[in-house]
Image (tube, rainbow, N blue to C red):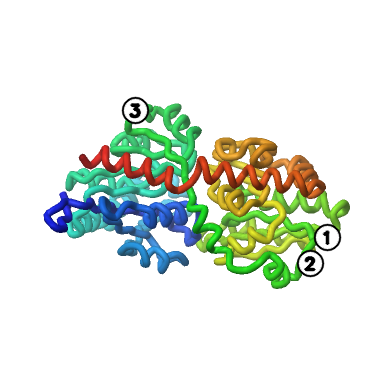
Amino acid sequence: MAWYVWNDMVIMRRILYVEQNTDGTVGGSHYCLLDMIRHLDRNRFDPLVVFYREHSLLEEFRRHCPVFIMPSPAGVDIVSRLPGAAGPFRPIVRLMQRAINLIRYAIPSYIKKVRFLRLHHIDLVHLNNAVNRGYDWVLACGAVRVKCITHNRGPFRLSRSDRAFARRFDAVVSIAGFLRDELERQGIERTGRSVVVNDGIDADDITSRVRRPPDAVRRELGIAPHDPLIGIVGNVRAWKGQDVVVRAVDLLRRKHPALRCLVIGGISDTRRDDRAFLRSLESYVAGRGLGEHVLLLGFRDDVPDLVNALDILVHASTAPEPFGRVILEGMVLEKPVIATNIGGPLEIVEDRVSGFLVPPDDESALAAAIDTLLADAALRERIARAGKHRVVNTFHIRNHIDAIHDLYEALLP
């Protein structure tokens, strides 16, 4: 076990964080991990972080801790390339494929991780994404007697092998209560090893990253100072609901001819479905003549500036959002938020108190909520103030990191 001594006093344990994203996008899990590392008590814990590929936040992470890139082996896919799915020989070919991947990729990857843990004297591995990933880390940790925990950032359907491995984590940290409940329904018992720690954000950090006034942002985008402006932030993919927002704008543009909508978010360079979804968005905007109303901005590194220029922030996921960090960010910037009433947003937003909740995949309900807020400036201000108050008092990063510290201390006596 790695103990670090200064002036004859033991002061810290070494924590390895692993972000397992492989699709090239930067999302909420990256920003939550960055906040966790930034606020970690360095008198007790010494962080390192592993990523599977390069991304736009690497330099920011490097300012706070050592960073390692450890590409995840993709393996070979023989079965799908065979004509006619290999007919009666398919089971044999699949077995051969598994054997090749085990010998050529899985075993060397496992050995590399064991060596890494030993070389860097790791005390605890904290995976950042899900209970159905990182089994190689679980096995490597077992080999060197290192604790291994995981964040659970999504509602996943677990296979029998998933459930078996999930029970081997020393702790599972679900970011919302409904995620822990879902694990319990799938046979992951609710014990001291299964905990809920809501994501938190640093309100001061979010506000400090606003560099330009709203009017300057609007001028850059060709939007007049008093034009109603809404926006949605998130990686572009079907379940995030960007298409629902665009359809709601289509419904509203006659009543609000000056309405503008920003669609802010990058796209995976590996997921074909996401690229097809973006093309369908572009086609709908062009086909309905919405070019003046909808701006597809793609990835932006000035999201706080853009959100600060909005009148309303929309969060339109059509599947249960694991939590909803962008909702918290919008509330901190005192923007009234409209979110769908499934998943994490139900635990963040108090309907018509600190935000609005609407059914998923329902452009009419979303358009009605937008219309209500656009028509009542006093309501927007009241919702915005209540939203910020709720985040600062309930979802601040300090609450989150205190719970993480307590978990580490319990696992590393």
**Mark 1 closeness class: few <14, some 14–19, many ≥20 residues within 10 Å:** some
First in residue order: circle 2 vs circle 3: 3
Cα separation between marks 1 and 3: 54 Å
In the rendered image of this protein, does residue 41 appear above or below residue 216? above
Amino acid at pointer 2: Ala
**Depth-wise, is mark 2 or mark 3 nearer the camera?**
2
Cα separation between marks 2 and 1: 9 Å
**Mark 2 closeness class: few <14, some 14–19, many ≥20 residues within 10 Å:** few
Amino acid at pointer 1: Ala
Dot 3: element: loop
Q: Residue furthest right?
A: 254
In the rendered image of this protein, does residue 298 appear above or below residue 236? below
Q: Which residue is mark 3?
A: 191
Pointers 2 and 1 in contact (C-beta within 8 Å)? yes
**Mark 3 closeness class: few <14, some 14–19, many ≥20 residues within 10 Å:** few
Q: Which residue is mark 1?
A: 258
The location of residue 266, given as percent across then percent down, is: 57, 62
Amino acid at pointer 3: Thr
First in residue order: circle 2 vs circle 1: 2
The location of residue 7, given as percent across then percent down, is: 14, 58
